[in-house]
Amino acid sequence: MSATFYTHLPILTELSQIVEPSNFHPAPADWWVALSDVRNSTQAINAGHYKAVNMAGAASIVALLNCAPAERIPFVFGGDGATLLIPPDLLEVARATLAGVRAMVQRELQLDLRVGFVPLAEVRAHGAEVAVARLRISAHYDQALLSGGGTALAERLIKDPTTASRYLLPADAPLREADMTGLECRWQDIPSPHGETVSLLVMAMPGMSPEAASAIYRQVIAEIEAAYGQEQDYHPLAVPNLHLSLKLRDLLGETKLRTPPRMMARWIYMAQIWALNMGVRLYTMGEVLRGKRPWWQDYREQVFRTADYKKYDDTLRMIIAGRPQQRQQLSAFLEHAYQQGQLVYGLHVTDRALMTCLVFERMGRQVHFVDGADGGYARAAVALKDRLKSC
C-alpha cells in the first residue's frame, strides 16, 4: 500500500550499499516531497547562532514524527533544514504542522524557516526520481536514504523565484501548534577524538547516469576509508567525550521550543533540565568513586549507537573525525575528481561536533543528529554550491 511504503522497505546495513541502484525503490506516485530550511542560515551562523539553526532544522522532523508513526515518514536532516516524504493521507496535517513550526521558529529563535511541498508526480514530470532505501543504524533507528535527483529538483523549484509561488507554503496557511515532545539539546559540544571534525558533502556531477554516479560514490567511500580507516576509526563521537551541559545558554533553545511563551514556565523548565544534568553528573561521580558502573554509561553508549552522522540524499553527507593529514589526503582526491568533472564537494573543519536529539524513549526510540560545530553542514553546503556554480 502507498501509505505503508516505507514501513515495508527491505533493511540495508551499510552506507556503502548506496552504490547499488537496485537497493532504492521509487516512492509512490501520490506522495509529496516536503523541504524546510533556514533562510540566511550562513548569516545566523556567523552571528554565533549555529545551535539555533540546528534546532530549527530538527524541529520540522520531530513535529511531523509526533503526528504519525515514525516508520511512515522518511526524512533526512541537513543541518539547517530537513527533507521529508509525505504520504497523501498525512499531507494536510503535515502542511499545518510545518506552518506551526515555521511560526514557532520565527517567534522563539528569530529565524526564517522556508517550507515547501512538491508533488512527486511533478518531480517525475521534470525527468527526476525520488527513490528510497532504509538503512538500519541501530535497533531503535532506521535512516532514510534518497536517490534519483528528485529532492534536489524539488529544492530548486521551491527556491527559484519563477516557480516558488507554486510550492512554498503560503504565509497565511492554516497552522496547528507544533508538538516538540522529544526535541532535546542538552549536551556540551563534543571534542573530536582525533583533533578535527570534518563536515563533508559530496555530490556526483549532475547529469551523470545512475551507473556513473554509483561508480563515483563507490570511489569516494573507498578513498574515505583509505584516508581515515574504518567507521570505528573516524566516528565523530567518543563515549568518554559525551557530557551534559550546565550552561544555561546551551539549554535555552530546547526550553523555548518545549514550553509556552511565559517567563515562569520557562524558568521552571530550564531549572529542571539544569538540575537533572547536575544530578546525573553527581550520581555518576559517586558511582565511579565506589567502583561501580553507572547506568548513565549505558545511556551514553546508546547515544553513540544512535548517532546520525552519515547519510545520503543524492549527496553523501558525513561528519568525520580525524587528523589534518587525513583530511588533506581526502581533499586532494576530491579536488582532482572535481577538476575532472566527476563530482562537486564541500567541507568544513572544526575541532568539535554538536548534537541535536530526538528522544522519544530514554533507553529506546531515539536519534541524535550530529553536525560539525560553527556551521558544519551549512558551511560545507556553501562551498559545494560555489563549486557547482563554476562548473
Image (cartoon, grey):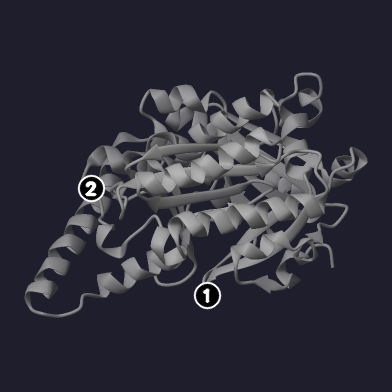
Identify the residue shown where x is 76% and y is 48%.
Answer: 91
Q: Nearer the viewer, residue 13 or 338?
A: 338
Q: Is residue 55 placed above or below 171 in the rendered structure?
A: below
In the picture, the quarter occupied by the N terminus is: bottom right
Identify the residue shown where x is 81% and y is 24%.
Answer: 163
Quadrant housing residue 250: top left
Reading the image, the residue beneath label 2 is 271
Query: Type of residue at label 1?
Result: Ala
Question: Is residue 287 toward the left or the right of residue 184 in the image?
Answer: left
Q: Nearer the viewer, residue 31 or 348?
A: 348
For mark 2, does the 10 Å Cα neighbourhood hold few (<14), some (14 to 19), or many (20 or more) residues? some
* Labels 2, 1: front one: 1
Q: What element does badge 1 sit on?
A: loop
**Residue 251: percent from left, percent from top:** 30, 43
How far apart marks 2 and 1 lie (CA) works out to 33 Å
Reading the image, the residue beneath label 1 is 139
Q: Is residue 215 placed above or below 178 in the rendered structure?
A: below
Tell me if I can see residue 100 in this picture.
no
Quadrant housing residue 38: top right
**Residue 230: percent from left, percent from top:** 46, 65
Identify the residue shown where x is 74% and y is 70%.
Answer: 9
Query: Type of residue at label 2?
Result: Ala
Tell me if I can see residue 350 in this picture.
yes
In the picture, the quarter occupied by the C terminus is: top right
Q: What element does badge 2 sit on?
A: helix
Residue 149's label in the rendered image is: none
